[in-house]
């Protein structure tokens, strides 16, 4: 791929439009990814839970309320412009969570993240886009995310019963890469057949009629961290006017 930022951005847009996803490499340096992973391991020991959504894994929710190290992922200049290109500027960070796949954790069932009532068959202006921040190298044996190219245009939030899904791609990429995809794409974590633990952050953005948080960042957010946020981060977290007012979320944890 060309090193020209303009041509790279054009390629990434094309892949999201056609396939529903793209992988951006070198978003985080190895040092940055390793430092975030170190913090995540500590948080998992302190606050992690068993997660059984279509497959087993460890889970840490609402990461911006735990440590400022996660703030850089909210409006990263290699990621957010792609999100805004497809969704517009009037968006929020629905949540930033972590999914930690351990050795012997099985394959997660393929699924979409957008409710059927909000599905758009054209998928030209998505109501949700996802980011997967790879804090370890993603390989098939460590349980890298699987995704079905073009499924964002299927008109269905889930894989249809009685149909075999054959065209599945594995998002294999170096540590520090970010998978960006339309929330309507069918996807799922892979089985971890290795002896290593897979650590990843999952941030998603919402717009339109679905602009409420999955996990409200105002809940537990430390007021002294407010000045550490950029102006755009405050907008995405609805903190332009400060911290402390709950603003309708799916979960409080």
Image (tube, helix red, strand yellow):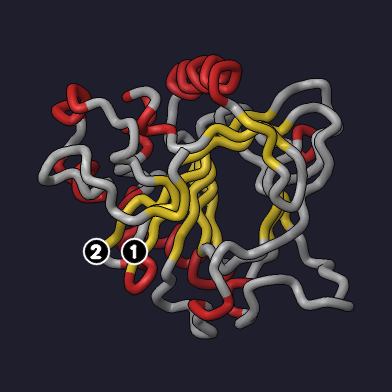
**24 or 65: nearer the viewer:** 65
Dividing the picture into quadrants, the one containing residue 11 is bottom left
- 244 sits to left or right of 64: left
Instruction: Indicate the position of residue 139 as horizontal and vertical percent values.
Output: 73, 36
Which residue does the image show at 13% across and 46% down from the upper left? 240
- 54 sits to left or right of 149: right
Q: Are marks 2 and 1 in contact (CB under 8 Å)?
A: yes
Instruction: Indicate the position of residue 5 as horizontal and vertical percent values.
Output: 33, 49
Q: Residues within 10 Å of mark 2 (few under 14, many from 20)?
A: few
Q: Residues within 10 Å of mark 1 (few under 14, many from 20)?
A: some
Residue, disc 1: 211
Which residue does the image show at 50% across and 42% down from the upper left? 178
How much space separates mark 2 and mark 1, taking CA atoms? Answer: 9 Å
Q: Which mark is residue 90?
A: 2
Q: Is residue 140 above or below residue 122?
A: above
Q: In terms of secondary structure, where does tag 1 sit?
A: loop
């Amino acid at each position: 791929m060309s090193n020209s930022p303009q041509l790279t951005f054009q390629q990434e847009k094309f892949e999201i439009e056609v396939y529903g996803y793209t992988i951006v490499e070198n978003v985080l340096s190895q040092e940055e990814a390793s430092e975030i992973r170190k913090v995540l391991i500590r948080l998992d020991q302190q606050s992690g839970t068993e997660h059984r959504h279509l497959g087993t894994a460890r889970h840490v929710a609402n990461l911006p309320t735990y440590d400022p190290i996660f703030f850089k992922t909210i409006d990263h200049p290699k990621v957010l412009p792609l999100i805004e290109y497809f969704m517009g500027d009037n968006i929020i960070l629905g949540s930033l969570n972590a999914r930690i796949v351990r050795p012997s954790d099985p394959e997660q069932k393929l699924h979409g993240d957008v409710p059927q009532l909000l599905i758009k068959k054209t998928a030209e202006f998505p109501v949700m886009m996802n980011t997967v921040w790879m804090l370890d190298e993603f390989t098939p044996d460590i349980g890298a995310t699987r995704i079905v190219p073009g499924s964002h245009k299927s008109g269905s939030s889930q894989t249809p019963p009685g149909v075999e899904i054959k065209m599945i791609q594995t998002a294999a990429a170096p540590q520090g890469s970010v998978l960006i995809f339309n929330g309507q794409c069918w996807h799922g974590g892979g089985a971890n057949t290795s002896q290593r633990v897979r650590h990843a952050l999952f941030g998603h953005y919402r717009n339109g009629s679905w602009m409420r948080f999955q996990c409200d960042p105002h809940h537990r957010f430390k007021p002294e961290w407010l000045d550490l946020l950029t102006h755009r981060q405050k907008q995405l977290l609805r903190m332009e006017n400060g911290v402390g007012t709950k603003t309708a979320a799916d979960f409080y944890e």
